[in-house]
Each structure stands twice: as C-alpha cells, then as structure tokens.
Amino acid sequence: EVVLTQSPGTLSLSPGERATLFCRASQGVSSTYLAWYQQKPGQAPRLLIHGASSRATGIPDRFSGSASGTDLTLTISRLEPEDCAVYYCQQYDTSPTWTFGPGTKVEIK
Amino acid sequence: EVQLVESGGGLIQPGGSLRLSCAASGFIVRSNYMSWVRQAPGKGLEWVSVIYSGGYTYYADSVKGRFTISRDNSKNTLYLQMNRLRAEDTAMYYCARGAFSGYEWDYWGQGTLVTVSS
C-alpha cells in the first residue's frame, strides 16, 4: 500500500508570496496517477491538478504541479486571500484503491 | 451543469444501517465511474468505494463486507448502503464523479453527515 506524506503541515504566508507544498509517496507511483485537491472550510474538495501537472478545468494558472520520482510538488505562484484552504495530494493504484495525503493547511497572513 | 446532491445522513446507533443517496444531474451516472469519499470530523479524506460504468465495484478494507455501492440508472442516482455501522464510520460522506482520465474525481457533492453514536 502506498502511503503519502505531506509537508509542511501548515504554511503561513502573505498575499503575493509563493507557496510550495510537498507530497512524498512511500514507493514509486506513475505521475499519471497523482492529483491535488483544494478544500476550503465547510466545502467539498475541488480538483486542482491531475496527472501530476495538468490543471483541471477553470483552475487559475497561478497553480502548478510537478513530480519527480516519489515527490510531488504543488506551487501557488502568487497567493491570494481566497487560496486559504487545506490542500491534499492523492494517488491511485491499480487494485483499485485511492489514497490521500494528510493535507497541508495554507494560511494567509 | 453537473450537480451532485447527497442525502440520507443522520444519527444512527452502532450496529445500525443507513442508506445514502447521491442524485446526479447534468451527466449520466452509469456512463461514469463514481465514488464515495468520507471525511471524519477534523480529519483528512478517505476513499470508501467505487462503481465503474461496467458495474464493477471495489471497497476500502475498512468498509469491505459492510458497505455496498450501487446505482439506479432510471433515477440517475448513486447509493451507499451502510450496515453494521461503527463509531469510526462517523464522517461527512461525499459522492464524486470520476474524471475523464480515470484516476481522480472532477465533481463532488456537498456531502451528507453520518454520526454513529449511542
């Protein structure tokens, strides 16, 4: 079973700053099977990135994703107040099962 | 417009049963893979179950043998039958539509809360 770990647990930044969120898989996973979600308080998750680096429909281009080996990165280039949320990485394996990371909380100062 | 509306949650005693519904509009449920994903209060996301367009179903180990996912094509609705409920099943339950790529979910409902407590 693939386990996902995310860091940092919480990120506190000012508007306009760059946010870099990390997700590490316990074993190699195809980038095709990796995604990121944003969840704002009281709301359902929202798909941001699929295939490790492809933005979902309607997602602003300040959100970008990349993957290398077992490491997945989500970058928010210029933080806006509405980006305050918890961000989850997710992976799929062919069992099939889906696994989420524990989340990174992004706070806006 | 794609919409998913869950219902059926509530307070239930341990050992009890509950059936969740997810009414879909704007697309055809039987043509997509659909999942239930849950989130315990203050915790992260946990995948629960999936049903593919061909009818194949799969479950997380934590619910296997107790939960059953199904759909009613005539009603364009997804279900989750939950039996032998435990306190640790307490969570917000979301239904979600599978994305075209096949490996994540592009539309989510707002969730229905299930509380298992005596």
Image (cartoon, coloured by chain):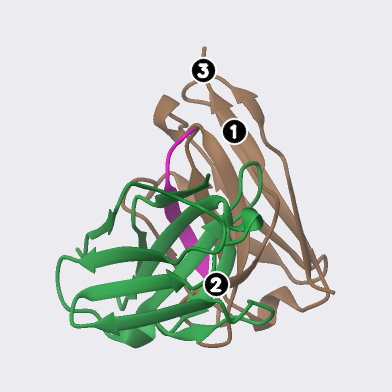
What is the chain identity of the residue bearing mark 1?
A: B
Which image quadrant: the N terminus of chain B?
bottom right
Labels 2 and 3 in the same subunit: no
Front-most of residues B26 and A46 = A46
Q: Main secondary structure of the magenta part?
A: strand
> Quadrant location of residue B11?
top right
Hue used for the chain lettered A:
green
Task: Determine if residue A95 is in view.
Answer: no
Q: Is residue A48 visible?
A: yes
Residue A67 rendering spot, x and y as whole percentages: 29, 82
Q: Residues within 10 Å of mark 1 (few under 14, many from 20)?
A: many
Q: Mark 1 — residue?
A: B114
Q: Is residue B50 magenta?
A: yes
Residue at image point 52% right, 36% down = B91
- Left/right placement of residue B66 relative to residue A46 reads left
Q: Give the amino acid type for the residue marked by disc 2 in the picture.
A: Leu
The residue drawn where x is 57% and y is 27% is B115
User: Which region shows up in magenta?
Assistant: B42-51
For residue A99, side relative to residue B102 (left or right): left
**Image-based side of A102 in relation to B99, left or right:** left
Which residue type carries mark 3? Ser
Give the CA separation, mark 3 to mark 1: 10 Å
Q: Are marks 2 and 3 in contact (CB under 8 Å)?
A: no
- The residue labelled by disc 2 is A48
Q: Which chain is brown?
A: B
- A40, B28: nearer the viewer: A40
The circle drawn on residue B74 is none
Relative height, residue B59 to residue A69 (above, below): above
